[in-house]
Image (cartoon, rainbow, N blue to C red):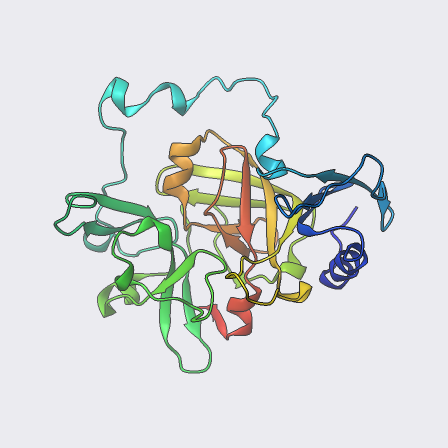
Amino acid sequence: MSFPTKEQNIAVLTAFQPIASVREILYLPHWTIVELDNGDGRHYEPKSLPGTVAGRTTLYHHGEAPFYKSMKNMTRARRVDPALNRATDLGPMPQDVENYLRRSSHLSPGCRLECGYGPKGPEVEGMNAATSAGVKLRQQFDGKEVITVANHGFLISREVYHPFAHEDKDRQRLVQLMPTASTKFTNDCYFQAEHPRVLLEGSGIKQGSWSEVDGMSSGIVNLLTYGRRYLRPQRPAGQPEIDFNGWHAISVDAIFGVVNNDICNGMCGAPIVQCESGGVAGFFHLSDGTNCFTAHLDDLVAEGWQLA
């Protein structure tokens, strides 16, 4: 079963408008999960909402915490579990401290990327935030070249700039490299993972497709796309709601590999590359160690960014 198209999703949400207040909808392989607004004073009696919508079995979740946070990992415990070897037990965890700029002929997606130590102050002084490099992009209109990074991996936010001035949609930022680093950065290799060839829009991400990601803390990790979420953007009080066409689209992928939350934090920003096409389906930035949630790149593509 394939994912509903964007137009089909809009039709489903429009049909719900008279009977329910929906904040999110999650399409899984054989059923649909509808997240209902919580705290708006509305109450839904059992069986008061349709059990089948658009030919798919439909379940409803009416609570403060999202449905996916209630899902449990029922698989057998891994033989190699990084959670059992924490820094407090064995000393500092190993880090990728290779200076690729000096000791390697090139820089590539997945390399360790850090902002340096934080300025003086009670919160960030002496702290070092690091994450994984994304891909090198070129703006087709003016030729500007940048690389993508995970914005929450950096302490000094003024050193990066938003790809969109009006709203933070995908938690990615674009940074402009110094000339030497920019010349060395290439998308033609990506550690053990498939190297990126093109940016994908959401319509190009198919259910059941396999992808790879290889960050500075992980080694290669495989992802299987099995779900899609549409979320209503948060709005300031008193502001009009955004049309269904503007809801955030996010892929849901199952993670296969030796990872936990600590390792996933270091993978943030690394590109998720489809095995067959080399298409970049998104950037790793939100995971619970079992599932990965990835924002689609339609806006980046629409604004003229492409792989350099």
- 155 versus 78 height, above or below: below
Q: Nearer the viewer, residue 232 or 304?
A: 232
Q: Residue at x 57, y 46 (%)?
A: 211
Picture quarter with the C terminus: bottom left
Quadrant of the image occupied by residue 293: top right
Quadrant location of residue 30? top right
Q: Farthest bottom residue?
A: 142
- Left or right for 305, reference 57: left
For image coordinates 48% across by 17% down, the residue present is 79
What is the x, y in percent for residue 31? 77, 40
In-image side of 183 versus 201 (left or right): left
Residue that appears at 29% across and 46% down: 130
In the image, residue 77 lies at what x, y percent?
A: 53, 18
Mark yes or no: residue 300 visible.
yes
In this image, 245 relative to 147: left or right?
right
Q: How far across and how far down the image is residue 85, in percent?
A: 34, 20
Residue 53 at x, y percent in the picture: 84, 48
Q: Is residue 192 visible?
A: no
Front position in the image: 48 or 153: 48
Residue 30 versus residue 275 in the image, above or below:
above
Position of residue 304 relative to residue 121, above or below, is below
| Count of marks, rendered view | 0
Q: Nearer the viewer, residue 207 or 108?
A: 207
View extreme (front): residue: 41
